[in-house]
Image (cartoon, helix red, strand yellow):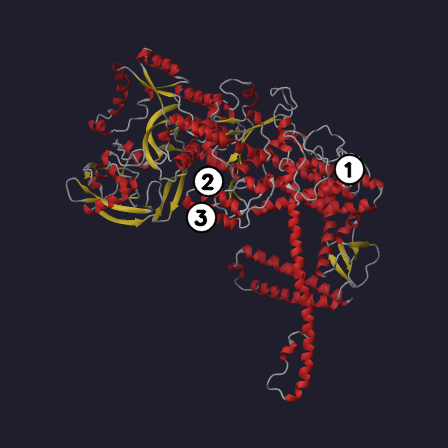
Amino acid sequence: MTDSEPQIGPTEDQPQEKTAKQLEKEAKKAAKLEKLKAKLDKKSTAPAVQKDKPEKKVKETKECAVYTANTAVGDKKDISDSMPDAYSPLYVEAAWYSWWEKQGFFKPEYGRKSVLEPNPKGSFVMVIPPPNVTGSLHLGHALTNAVEDAITRWHRMNGRTTLWNPGCDHAGIATQVVVEKKLWREEQKTRHQLGREEFIKRVWDWKNEKGDRIYEQLRSLGSSFDWSRVRFTMDPSMCRAVNEAFIRLHDAGDIYRANRLVNWSCTLKSAISDIEVDKVDLPGRTMLSIPGYDSKVEFGVLVHFAYRAEDSDEEIVVATTRVETMLGDVAVAVHPNDTRYKHLIGKNLVHPILKRKLPIIADDYVDMNFGTGVVKITPAHDPNDYEIGKRHNLPFITIFDDEGRMLDNCGPFAGKKRFDVRREIIKTLELAKLYKETKDHAMVVPLCSRSKDVVEPMLKPQWYIRCDTMAAEAIKAVKSGELKIIPDMHEKIWYHWMEGIRDWCISRQLWWGHRIPAYRVTLPAAEEPRQVIKPRRRRTRSGRKKDVRRMRAPPPAQKEEQWVSAHSEEEALSKAAAKFGVPAGDIKLARDEDVLDTWFSSGLFPFSIFGWPDNTEDLQAFYPGTLLETGHDILFFWVARMVFFGQRLLGKLPFKEVYLHPMVRDAHGRKMSKSLGNVIDPVDVVRGVSLEQLHAQLADSNLDPREIEKAKQGQKQDYPNGIPECGTDALRFALCAMTQGRDLNLDIQRVQGYRFFCNKLWNAAKFALMYFPPDTSYEVHEPALPQGLSSMDRWMLSRLALAVQRVNQGFRSYEFPAATTHCYNLWLYDLCDVYLEYLKPVFGQGSEEQKLGARRTLYTTLEYGLKLLSPFMPFITEELYQRLPRQDASCPSICVADYPTESDTPWRSEELEANVETALKIVHLIRSTRSEYNLTNKQKTSAHLVTSGDQAEVRELFASLQSLANSELSDDQPPTGCSILTVSDKIEVHLVLKGLIDPQKEITKLEKKKESLSQTISKLQQAISADDYTTKVPLEVQKLNSEKLTQSQGEMERLQAAVETLKLM
């Protein structure tokens, strides 16, 4: 009877004589309701109990241990107290780093008399990709440092002379923008109001205040840098190296000055590099917010307007996405084979606003089938038009000033802002009846990544480096194998960039940075003609007088001879006097106001940090380096430039290998962006942070107030409960475990998963250490193992040997996920899930000989296992290593301990591993069957192995592992009514279930499973038997269906066998 049955009792239609029965049923109902009430009362007390449980959990989190010993900075951590009950990152990470640093473990001199002392094991040298000084590190930096530190620690533990050199980049544009914003926010002043000298002083003040934060973050990540060699790219020694490099390259003709198109930021009033340009795809008409404009500006449209012919009413329609640039038009171009316009080639059009004559020229560049087949030519403001202008000797008319306002040559629009003119010029064209239409047009808008302003191509005199010869040498280095790029998929990109390389613009119109050591030379008036005759001749080489009038832009070499470069004004004066044959007293010098592109000094980093141009001991010992590790996004901007300068200035590649890691994205695959709210400080992942604290960080940032709310929503979506405390080791391990491919989608939950792994590691070590009696010490097994070890001892050592082999192989080939996976599997599955469980009965009732072998095997696994993990997880491994009962205590730290090698661990036995795998399969089958029948741990089962062939070792191994299956191996003949589990074609397990389960109830459950499975099999068979199945269904689907059918039929057979077994009980 169910509780619902009383509800279908008498209705109003029933005769009155059944009232007695009705009352009887109501009495039964009342009794049942009473029982139900009692159940509910019990349940009502449950929440109170459940409330207590969370309180206990809260207490547990509150009880996370904190290191409280009075240890001075740099002293060794006191580990005399017992281990805390649970893993606590705050406790584990305390005190170790300052001790490592003070002991000099990270210095290449450690254990050696001199860095020049030969080391038979070799050396390893790597420089940090210097982070910008502009603030905090983000998770991209954390990835770089996790990978680089793991590599560095592995080499150090392998006995090599090891140097990982730290440093920081002055980040010209980024730093100047940050300080300018701060200056305006706090004092409502511009840098021009302060003056150059005072502004640079303010930048230094800001750097001194904020710069150390980055170094502290790097220390908190456990990065094993040699801090005695730290370098900032504006240090005096670095400035000297930068000046020397410029002067040498300028004197050799590799650096020259030219008037060319550059990426110009009107907000910054400076040229910027390609990497500082964000290319934003627009699908069509889009209104964008642009700095300096109150209302949004229209982009993503194509404006069509007409130019009229000079001597007729004929019109030619052109189209442009930047209609304001028509004020700089000097011609229109058509294809020479376009019959529509052939008759107009050589004639002129008239500019409707400036009345300038615009020749109609023929050029193969024009696509006849795009738009009207006519292209307006603005050589001073478009890269393609610039090339056409040079080919046809057209004038170069600049129409914008440095701030993006129209120049005096723009008629009625002079002095107006460029995007205001964009709106006004259309009205002017409408009045002249020349405006035709505006259409949606997909386009790419270049935005300055620092100012968010639209980048303008502008004609500016700048300094350039000739790159063709250096690029050819860089290609040769990779093709010959002298320089190895890993992964090799990036080689194609290397060749693509090098083969299509253009000269590098290295000057920036900033105040913060390395001021260019070049001096403009003004000679006496009588001497000046010598400097201009040559360019004037070149300009009139064609013999056409109009070319002299039209060529407004000086050719690249026109002013080169009027500049000298030097370390000081005195040196410059001496060089100028010698160069031009003029007395020094007659020469006037003016130093260039510009600074060098930040990438120039970064490109010198691998040798400037070691004292170049002086031939220092460090330069001899550490150049060239071994490896350069960085993100693939700066392969050209940084890696290529280091290769250029290393080969050109020192005649040697700066490193032998380049390893390029993926770009860190958020869990959704989006690029890290402050406006999305997904830029995370690694320290927040290490220590944990609330959602409110994340919001507060946005308020303190330089983010535009309009974007803060958007960023808050992004944070709320991704981190509704903030970010949990994960610890440094978990973050490092997670980043290395995910380092593959082009992008790394970082999910904080996965990092938290490795924090749980740290807890498992902690508990496993704590538990294992209890097996070592007090005042005993141990050493690892020798390569030749002693007699008397059990099969499971030898299996554990075999698994350890596999991990040693694969982790070393992973480091050698930069396959970090493989290395981390084998570390993880060794600890979690092999040691925790199997070996430690196996040891419980051994230490409970085993012989002394068994215990002795087990202890040494366990110790070997712990010491080698910690060493394997140490490059990835330096803190927890140091903490546990120091607590090991080591017989040889001569090695002070795991940082400088010997890394396990294949020769240390020649213990691999694939046959033994295969047999243990079979025994574990038996364990899992029994556990799965027990789970199916809902047996509790108290209900022990008897297992009978029925085998064919020689399976003695498997039987012995299962006997060792039977406690894992909550079963006892019986040597008797199996009784009838057992559940038969097929392990392989040679092994069956007969599991005795009689007396432990209700056979009829289990048969009912299995019959339901069979019914569901039967429907699946029927559908699959029906689909497969269709006439057009083989022709219409993809092969992959056919294969999946076939596998599913075979699997389902096999499961049906097992279910039927189980039913038959149950019927016999």
Q: Is residue 169 visible?
A: no
In-image side of 1038 versus 998 (left or right): left
- Secondary structure found at label 2: loop
Q: Nearer the viewer, residue 807 or 107?
A: 107
Q: Nearer the viewer, residue 493 or 711?
A: 711
The image shows residue 347 at horizontal and vertical percentages of 19, 38
Instruction: Say which residue label 2 marks.
Output: 701
Q: Is residue 999 visible?
A: yes
Three-letter amino acid code of the residue under disc 3? Lys
Q: Nearer the viewer, residue 1064 or 426?
A: 426
Nearest to N terminus: mark 1 or mark 2? 2
Instruction: Say which residue label 1 marks.
Output: 856
In-image side of 673 versus 561 (left or right): right
Nearest to N terminus: mark 3 or mark 2? 2
Q: Residues within 10 Å of mark 1 (few under 14, many from 20)?
A: some
- Secondary structure found at label 3: helix
Nearest to N terminus: mark 1 or mark 3? 3
Instruction: Say which residue label 3 marks.
Output: 710
Three-letter amino acid code of the residue under disc 1? Arg
Instruction: Tally the marks.
Output: 3
Q: Which picture quadrant has residue 857?
A: top right
In-image side of 1017 versus 953 (left or right): left
Marks 3, 2: nearer the viewer: 2
Give the CA separation, mark 1 to mark 2: 55 Å
Q: Which picture quadrant has residue 928?
A: bottom right
The residue under the point 35% across, 33% down is 269
Label ID, residue 407: none
Give the CA separation, mark 1 to mark 3: 58 Å
Three-letter amino acid code of the residue under disc 2? Ser
